[in-house]
Amino acid sequence: MRLEVDVRSGIPIYIQIVEGIRRAVEAGGLHSGERLPTVRALAEELGVAPNTVVKAYGELQRMGLIGSRPGVGTVVAEGVEGTSRERKIEELQERLRALVRDAADLGITEDELWESFEAEFERLRG
Protein backbone atom coordinates (compact mmCIF):
# COMPACT_ATOMS: atom_id res chain seq x y z
CA MET A 1 0.00 0.00 0.00
CA ARG A 2 1.35 3.37 -1.00
CA LEU A 3 -0.19 6.41 0.68
CA GLU A 4 0.64 10.03 0.04
CA VAL A 5 -0.59 13.13 1.82
CA ASP A 6 -0.46 16.75 0.75
CA VAL A 7 -0.23 19.13 3.69
CA ARG A 8 -1.10 22.07 1.39
CA SER A 9 -4.29 20.60 -0.06
CA GLY A 10 -6.62 22.04 2.55
CA ILE A 11 -8.01 18.55 3.25
CA PRO A 12 -7.19 17.37 6.77
CA ILE A 13 -4.38 14.82 6.69
CA TYR A 14 -6.35 12.20 8.61
CA ILE A 15 -9.10 12.42 5.96
CA GLN A 16 -6.49 11.94 3.23
CA ILE A 17 -5.29 8.81 5.03
CA VAL A 18 -8.85 7.51 5.44
CA GLU A 19 -9.64 8.11 1.77
CA GLY A 20 -6.36 6.57 0.61
CA ILE A 21 -6.96 3.37 2.57
CA ARG A 22 -10.63 3.26 1.55
CA ARG A 23 -9.66 3.58 -2.12
CA ALA A 24 -7.01 0.88 -1.73
CA VAL A 25 -9.63 -1.50 -0.30
CA GLU A 26 -12.16 -0.67 -3.03
CA ALA A 27 -9.57 -1.06 -5.78
CA GLY A 28 -8.37 -4.39 -4.43
CA GLY A 29 -4.97 -3.13 -3.31
CA LEU A 30 -5.81 -4.19 0.25
CA HIS A 31 -7.66 -7.38 1.09
CA SER A 32 -9.55 -8.76 4.08
CA GLY A 33 -7.19 -9.77 6.84
CA GLU A 34 -4.24 -7.87 5.38
CA ARG A 35 -2.13 -6.13 8.00
CA LEU A 36 -1.78 -2.36 7.94
CA PRO A 37 1.34 -0.53 9.08
CA THR A 38 1.59 0.28 12.76
CA VAL A 39 0.59 3.79 13.78
CA ARG A 40 4.20 4.72 14.41
CA ALA A 41 5.45 3.23 11.12
CA LEU A 42 2.78 4.96 9.01
CA ALA A 43 3.29 8.27 10.83
CA GLU A 44 7.03 8.11 10.11
CA GLU A 45 6.46 7.10 6.48
CA LEU A 46 4.06 10.01 5.89
CA GLY A 47 5.89 12.49 8.07
CA VAL A 48 2.86 13.17 10.26
CA ALA A 49 2.10 13.00 13.97
CA PRO A 50 1.11 9.57 15.31
CA ASN A 51 -2.13 11.09 16.66
CA THR A 52 -3.13 11.87 13.06
CA VAL A 53 -2.81 8.20 12.11
CA VAL A 54 -4.66 7.16 15.28
CA LYS A 55 -7.52 9.48 14.30
CA ALA A 56 -7.58 8.06 10.74
CA TYR A 57 -7.50 4.46 11.97
CA GLY A 58 -10.30 5.27 14.42
CA GLU A 59 -12.46 6.65 11.61
CA LEU A 60 -11.71 3.60 9.42
CA GLN A 61 -12.68 1.34 12.30
CA ARG A 62 -15.98 3.23 12.76
CA MET A 63 -16.60 2.76 9.03
CA GLY A 64 -16.06 -0.98 9.47
CA LEU A 65 -13.10 -1.10 7.08
CA ILE A 66 -10.44 -2.09 9.60
CA GLY A 67 -10.15 -3.78 12.95
CA SER A 68 -7.59 -4.76 15.55
CA ARG A 69 -6.43 -8.29 16.18
CA PRO A 70 -4.53 -9.09 19.37
CA GLY A 71 -0.99 -10.11 18.54
CA VAL A 72 -1.41 -9.16 14.87
CA GLY A 73 -2.20 -5.45 14.86
CA THR A 74 -4.50 -3.45 12.64
CA VAL A 75 -5.97 -5.38 9.72
CA VAL A 76 -8.47 -4.88 6.92
CA ALA A 77 -11.85 -6.13 8.15
CA GLU A 78 -13.31 -9.37 6.85
CA GLY A 79 -15.75 -9.08 3.97
CA VAL A 80 -15.05 -5.45 3.12
CA GLU A 81 -14.61 -6.19 -0.57
CA GLY A 82 -18.30 -7.05 -0.94
CA THR A 83 -19.37 -4.15 1.25
CA SER A 84 -17.31 -1.72 -0.81
CA ARG A 85 -18.83 -3.02 -4.03
CA GLU A 86 -22.34 -2.70 -2.61
CA ARG A 87 -21.63 0.87 -1.52
CA LYS A 88 -20.25 1.72 -4.97
CA ILE A 89 -23.38 0.30 -6.61
CA GLU A 90 -25.57 2.39 -4.29
CA GLU A 91 -23.55 5.51 -5.14
CA LEU A 92 -23.87 4.71 -8.85
CA GLN A 93 -27.65 4.30 -8.49
CA GLU A 94 -27.88 7.69 -6.79
CA ARG A 95 -25.85 9.32 -9.58
CA LEU A 96 -28.12 7.64 -12.12
CA ARG A 97 -31.22 9.02 -10.36
CA ALA A 98 -29.68 12.50 -10.39
CA LEU A 99 -28.77 12.14 -14.07
CA VAL A 100 -32.33 11.16 -15.02
CA ARG A 101 -33.75 14.08 -12.97
CA ASP A 102 -31.31 16.51 -14.63
CA ALA A 103 -32.13 15.16 -18.09
CA ALA A 104 -35.86 15.55 -17.44
CA ASP A 105 -35.32 19.10 -16.16
CA LEU A 106 -33.45 19.91 -19.39
CA GLY A 107 -36.22 18.46 -21.53
CA ILE A 108 -34.18 15.49 -22.72
CA THR A 109 -36.51 12.65 -23.67
CA GLU A 110 -36.17 9.07 -22.52
CA ASP A 111 -35.26 8.02 -26.07
CA GLU A 112 -32.55 10.67 -26.30
CA LEU A 113 -31.13 9.58 -22.97
CA TRP A 114 -31.10 5.91 -24.05
CA GLU A 115 -29.32 6.89 -27.26
CA SER A 116 -26.68 8.64 -25.18
CA PHE A 117 -26.25 5.56 -22.96
CA GLU A 118 -25.96 3.28 -25.97
CA ALA A 119 -23.42 5.57 -27.62
CA GLU A 120 -21.35 5.66 -24.44
CA PHE A 121 -21.40 1.85 -24.12
CA GLU A 122 -20.32 1.58 -27.77
CA ARG A 123 -17.48 4.02 -27.12
CA LEU A 124 -16.31 1.90 -24.18
CA ARG A 125 -16.43 -1.31 -26.21
CA GLY A 126 -14.64 0.12 -29.20
Image (cartoon, grey):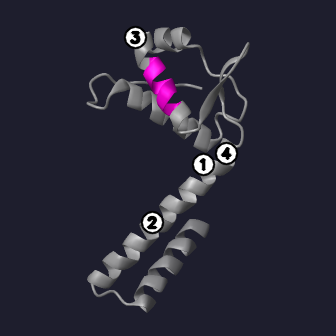
Q: Quadrant of the C terminus?
A: bottom right
Residue 100, given in percent of the width and then of the height, sits at: 39, 78
Residue 94's label in the rendered image is 2
Q: The N terminus is located in which quarter? A: top right
Which quadrant of the structure image shows residue 8? top left
In the rendered structure, which segment of residues is drawn in magenta?
A: 53-60
| First of labels 3, 1 by sequence position | 3
Q: Tell which circle, 2 or 3, labels the residue nearer the N-terminal end.
A: 3
Q: Are marks 4 and 2 in contact (CB under 8 Å)?
A: no
Q: Is residue 58 magenta?
A: yes
Q: Amino acid at mark 4?
A: Glu
**Quadrant of the image occupied by residue 80:** top right
Dot 1 corresponds to which residue? 84
Identity, as a three-letter code, of the amino acid under mark 2: Glu
Spatial CA span between label 3 and label 4:
29 Å
| Res 126 visible | no
Placement of 56 over or under 114, stated as above or below: above
Residue 49, label in figure: 3
Q: Decide: is 73 above or below 89.
A: above
Residue 81 bears which disc, if any? Answer: 4
Mark sitting earlier along the chain (1/2): 1
Q: Which of the 4 quarters of the picture holds residue 36?
A: top right
Spatial distance from mark 4 to mark 2, Cα to Cα?
20 Å
Amino acid under disc 3: Ala
